[in-house]
Each structure stands twice: as structure tokens, then as C-alpha cells.
Amino acid sequence: AGEGAALDDVSACAVQAVLMTWLGSHVQKAGRSELTDGPGALSGIAKLHDSVTISCSDRKFEGEGLIQFNIEAPPSCVRDVVKDVMNLLKNFKIHNLQDIKNRAKENIIRSIAKQHPAGNAIQRSKEIFAGVKRDAVLGAIDNVSDGLL
């Protein structure tokens, strides 16, 4: 896990949403088949190795965001997969930034729609307590530029 955006920093939350969208949230490759739940940079790493699952998620904890990576790989290639993920994070360049920003907005809207009323009330109260509203993050995504990533 690594430090993510503070929940009261709308601009940082927007940057994190764009970065998480670019990375993709879950990639699994078993043999020659690949399963993803959306395009993402992590899929390029999974394509290089057999029987690899890489997932990426952001979590909220005590007013801070965390970025978490989970890697499942055979012992024969786990070191290479970890190195590939680290290199990706150190040397990334988003070439289709506007598309990624649009997808990040769609992901936020979808996550709002998926939440059931009780969960939505709890999440909304956390946001209000933290001072961040998803609507503000949606608007701030438009201002994310290469220099902020």
C-alpha cells in the first residue's frame, strides 16, 4: 500500500481517481486468457506473465486515501511482476488523458449508483465529515493535467 490523497483535498482526490482509472482495478491472466474489468496499464504487465492476478484499489482510512496493490503470481515470476509494477509507477505517462478523465468520472458515477441506501448514507456522512463531496471531485477531474500526475 502507498499513501494516497487526503480526503479533504479535492484536487488530490481527482488526481487519484484519474490515476486509479489509468491503472485499472483488476487484471487476471490465466494461461493465454485474460480477464479485466476495464482497460488499464496493469493489463500490460499481466500480458507478460502467465497465471498472474493484479488488483489495484483505493481505500479511505482516517481521512487519508491509500492505494493498494495485490499481486498473485507463481513463485517463478512474482519478483518480475513486482518489478514491472514498480517500474510502471515510477515511469508512467498517460497518453490519452482526456479519455481516462472521462472514464474516471464514469467510474465515480457508477460507484454512486451501485451503493444501496444505507451504504450511501454512511459513505456520504464520511465525505461530509472529511469535507469532500464526490460532486466536487467530479468537477476537479477536468483540471487534472500531466503536471499534476
Image (spheres, rainbow, N blue to C red):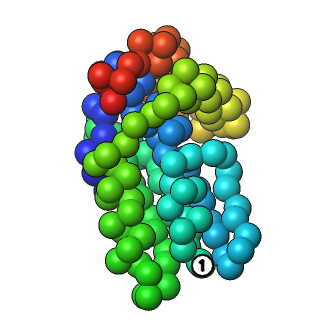
Quarter of the N terminus within the rendering:
bottom left
Is 64 positioned to the left or the right of 29 in the image?
Answer: left
> On the image, which quarter does residue 28 sit in?
bottom right
Figure label count: 1
Horizontal relation, residue 19 to residue 122: left or right: left
Residue 74 position, x and y percent, is 49, 85
Is residue 41 toward the left or the right of residue 111 in the image?
left
Comparing 59 with 117, the one in front is 59
Which residue is pictured at 59% across the width and 77% down the height? 50
Q: Give the residue at the far right of this rendering.
A: 33
Q: What residue do we see at 41% from left, 46% from top? A: 59
- Where, quadrant-wise, is the C terminus in this rendering? top left
Front residue of 30/133: it is: 30
Residue at position x 34%, y 19% from top?
11
> Residue 135 placed where, x, y %?
52, 15
Q: Residue furthest bottom?
A: 76
Rendered position, 22 above or below 47: above
Residue 130 makes an appearance in the image = no
Please name the residue shown 36% across and 68% down the image. Answer: 82
- Kindly identify which residue carries mark 1: 51
Between residues 114 and 29, which one lies in front from this camera angle?
Answer: 29
